[in-house]
Structures are given as structure tokens and as C-alpha cells.
Amino acid sequence: MDFFEAQARARKRTTRLVALFAVAVLGTIAAGYVAALALTGGLGVRGSSTDPFPWWQPRLLAGVTAVTVAIVGLASLGKWLRLRAGGRAVAEMVGARPVPPQTTDLRERQLLNVVEEMAIASGLPLPAVYVLDEEKGINAFAAGLTASDAVVAVTRGTLEKLNRDELQGVVAHEFSHILNGDIRLNLRLTAILFGILFIGLIGRGFLGGLRHTRPRSGRDNKNGGVILLLAVGLAMLVIGYVGYFFGRLIQAAVSRQREFLADASAVQFTRNSAGITGALKKIGGYALGSGIQTARAAQLGHFFFAQAFRSYLDNLWATHPPLDQRIRAMDSSFDGRYFEPPEVVDVATEPWSHTARPAIRPRSPISFDPLALVATIGAVAEAHTARAREIAQSIPEVLRTAARTPVGAAALVCGLLLSADPVRRVRQLTMITRLGGDAISSTLPPLDDCLRTLPAEARLPLLLLTPPALRQLPPADLARLLETLDELVHADAEVSLFEFALQKSLAHHLGLASRPAGAGEKHSPAEVSAEISVVLSFGACLHAADESEALAAFNVATAVFSGLHPPLALQSAGASDLVHLDAALDKLALLQGPAKKRLLTALASALASDGRMDTDETELLRALSSALDCPMPVPLL
């Protein structure tokens, strides 16, 4: 799977969604126009029985169009503003609860471990993890605007019925949706569907309000009013169901094909097709299947791992392909037989615990292929998952637990910046007490010994586990933490590559990175050639012994951008330092996807101009890749 092609497909699907939305609105307007003709006296409302086109009333059509567009647009906008909170808003909408970091439930602990391993493997920040306690069907979903605010939620049935391999397959499927950009599209689709359905909801409200209203005897003008309201309510309900029909068609059209891609990606991530196919076979053999009981299931059906609701028009409205087709796409030998899951999987026999901690194999500087490294962006393989499990097992449980709480995560981030020099370290600890507060300073000491011995390869993965917890800090506490981090970074009057990578990653994943005016990916390389020059000059000059060596590395890197006008030029060390690099990256985040791929390939070429990359260079490249919304999997040996 090519990450950049997947992102391009997501943008094309968004364009198709807009077109389908326009068709649905037109259908709703047509239904509203017919209803308006009927309510205003039928086809003779213009007062001329000889009119050859009594159904054509431009003013009425214009009025219906204006009202319909206003209602649908405002309802969609209102839903979108609510969903802008990200995945958390969707999880709360369906009644999911966050998994507590200190949970003693072995199934929830296993889920946390699987999600953490997948986050480390993919280079994504850890999503918040939720459980739908009241849902006994086997299902799950991922939701969010971006990878930085994503959540992964599973049903209680998923926890109880699936073994670890099957759970990992389901989670890998959901991570594929995050990597492919599907989660943002899903939120847009939800807002659009709500706008289309809103007219029907208004009609239902009219009729509900009239249930206890009885017509009066005799000639009473109020009776006419009640009948009129009843007619209006019925008309709006009918119009709403026309919108409902089109809305479900849109939902199905956008969703189905993506599920095959996500299934294939899950197999690629784990190299274990038995995991995800086992989960699908259990859904097929389970009495409750993948059904979701909440009333929101139909509205959010396109989010889920498997079909969340049933209808009389399943073939037309189904958001997911049939189970047998999904299974055969991964296992051609499938004989069509499903199996009933056990009442409850015995988690105690599952390899969920991290009590055994093998020492992580350090990644020494290695020979390097920039094209191969950039090709791994968004394309997690089984080797990355295995390496991620190894790294996860090397992180002491006390640190993993701390990363799941707001104060613990803040203390971890501060601890990662502590200097090995005793004198400087004492000064930094004083800064933490003065700026960060007593809560952080008292939480840090029990973590310090583990942080000192933490392998260098585990630092960035540990950092990527902290964003969900840090986002729970009150704004004032978060601002104070960021001030503390800045003081710690500049305590020795210089900024290391890791310190820069840490600050850049946190700022991006907490939504604090500054962006130029404008939205979306819109810059061409020619428009940001100065910023590209800064980034590539930084990589070329980083370890160059002299200017000629830097120029040689820069020329290797800029070959990726051959023919660019204005041409790229090597910047001096002072004009391509970390401050300039930071500003350049904020603007380059708006590059188009293929240009980002070329930029990262060129930067990797500059950093590895000597054919090798150390841990600091690798962490920097991964942090910058993440800041450009191109998550790079954990490096392999």
C-alpha cells in the first residue's frame, strides 16, 4: 500500500462525496417541491385551469430550494462543529467510555497493549482507547479528524469473544483507516448525512407534538391549523425519508470498497490472515453478529469494522461487503463455514503480559536506502509490528502506565529532557519544580531510574504514547508544561536533535503547531522553494566536515527536485539552523502529497549522504515526517 496514493484516493472520495451530496440535496428539493405543490392547492394553484404547465412554478421552486439548502446546510454545519472535537466526540455519541490507565481488567489491559504496539509500529501517536460496554456484538471503529486526535473503540463483545491475534487483526484494520485518511472522510460523511436527514427529524417532531392534540367538534379555525400542521409534518417526514434513502446510498457507496483495502492492510501489518479472518468467522457464527444496539448505529454505520445495523435494503444500503467476500479476499480456501465464538475467551492464557522483558537490540548506524525508507511511510509490515512489540516490551510498565495519565505523561516528557550532566540536571529539576508545579516534580523521581536506562530507540515511541493523556490537561497546565519544556531544552544554551524532535512532535500532535493562513494541501514545490532549500541545507550541513562536503550532500538531495524553478540553493549554517527549519516545516506542511514524498526522500538522502544514519538522525527524520502528516514506521535493524 502506498501511503501517498491512499491519501490521494481519500481526497478523490471526498470529491465524490460532495457530488453525491449535491445529488441527494437535489432529490430532497424535488420531493419538497412536489409536497409544496400539493400543500398549496395542487397543480391549479396559479389560478389558470388552461395553463399547459401548471406544475412549473419558478417562485415556489426557488423558495423550496432556498429553504431546503438552508436547513440541510445549517444542520450539516452544526453537526460538523460538534464533531470537530475529533474522535472523542464520536465515542461519546455512541456511549463509549475511555479505558482507565490503571485498569485491572485483563481484557482491557490486553487491548491497551495491542493498540500501543500498533501505534509504535506505525509511527502514529497513540489513539485514545474506548469500550462500548453495553454492546455485546463483535465490532470496533476508529474515528477522528486527524491521526493526532483519533480514537479506537471496541465493543464488550470484541473483548470477550476474540483472542489476541483476532483482536490485533481488528485493531490493525482500524489503524489502516487512520493511515488512509478515512477517519476524516467518515466525519464529513456523518455531518452530511445528518443534514440530509434533518428535514425528516423536523417532520417527526411536528407529528410527535401533535399526538396529544385532538380536533374540536364543529367549525373551529383551530382544526384547520391542526390539519395544516399535520399535513406539513407528514410532508416533511416524507421528504426526510427521500433524503434518508439517498443518504444511505451515499454511506454505502463511500464505505464498501475501503473495507477490502483495510482488511488487506491488516494482513500486511500482522502477516497473520488467521487473525482478522478468525474475527470475521466468529461474527458470522455468533448469534448477535456485529450488530450495534445504540440508536446511532445507522448514522455511524460507516465507521465500524463490520455491518452495524440491518435493514430491508441490505444489498443496497450495506456499508460493508458480505462477510464471505471479505474472508475469501484474504483466504481463498474458505469453505463458507463460520464458527460460534466461546462464551468468554480465557485472557489469562493469552500472551498479553509484558512481565518478561527481553533487552532491546540497539539499532546501530546502518547502510541506508532513502527511497526504501520513505516507501515504508504508512505501509506497516509484520517486521515493523514485531520490532514494535520488542520496543514496547523494553519500556518498563511504570513508564507505560505513567504515559496514560495527564500528570504522569507530563513528568515523562520532562524526564526525557533531563541532562546526564549532574550540575545541569540539578538546575533542570529546579526548573521543573518552579515552572511545572509540585504534581509533576513529585511524580518524576519514581520514573527517573527507568528513564535513565531507557534505550535510545524507545524514546520517541514512548513520547508518542503521551498525547492522549496530555490533551486531558487543563489549558493553563498545558501552557505551563510547554513553558517548562522550553526552559529545559534551552538550559544548556543549545538544542539537540532529539530535543527539537520532541518539541516538534508534541506541538504537532497536541494541535499547537503554527500553520500559515489557508487550509488544506495547496502549495506546489515552486511556491515553497526557499523553505525546501532550508530543510535540505539543514540535512546536508548537519554532519558535513566542510562546505564542499555539505554542497555534495545538498546536490545529492536536490536531484529529487531536478528542474525546479526557482532552483534550490544551499543555505549557510546560520540560515538553515533549527529555528529556520521549524518555520520552514510549518509552511511545508501544506505541500501536496507527492511533493511531501519527494521532500522526505531528498531530506533522507541528505542525512544519509555518508550512507549511514544514527539514532538521533532517524528520530529527527521520523519527527519531521510526522509533522508533515506522513507517519514513518518504527525503524528496523
Image: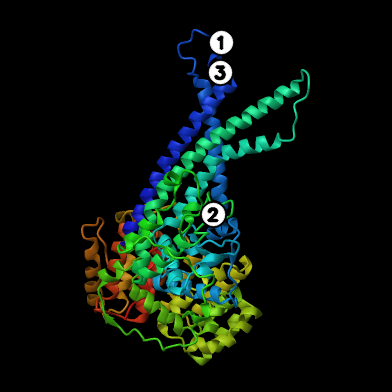
Give the percent coordinates (x, y) of residue 158. Answer: 51, 66
Say whether disc 1 or disc 3 marks the residue closer to the N-terminus. Answer: 3
The kind of secondary structure element at disc 3 is: helix
Q: Which mark is residue 42?
A: 3
In the displayed structure, would residue 592 be above or below residue 152?
above
Badge 2 vs badge 3, beta-carbon distance below 8 Å = no
Type of the residue with mark 1: Gly
What amino acid is found at the position of numbered circle 2 in the picture? Arg
Image marks 1 and 2: residues in contact by CB distance under 8 Å? no
Q: Quadrant of the N terminus?
A: bottom left
Q: Nearer the viewer, mark 2 or mark 3?
A: 3
In this figure, which residue is indicated by the disc labeled 2? 84
* Relative to 587, residue 435 above or below: below
Q: Which mark is residue 341?
A: none
Q: CA distance from mark 1 to mark 2?
A: 50 Å
Residue 459: image quadrant is bottom left
Judge whether residue 89 can be spotted in this image. Answer: yes
Location of residue 448 with respect to 243 vertically, above or below: below
For discs 1 and 3, the disc positioned in front in the rendered view: 3
Q: Position of residue 220 (x, y in %)?
A: 77, 20
Nearest to N terminus: mark 1 or mark 2: 1
Q: Quadrant of the C terminus?
A: bottom left
User: From mark 1 to mark 3, how far is it between C-alphas?
Assistant: 11 Å
Comparing 452 with 523, the one in front is 452
- Residue 517 appears in the figure: no
| Residue position marked by numbered label 1 in the rendering | 47
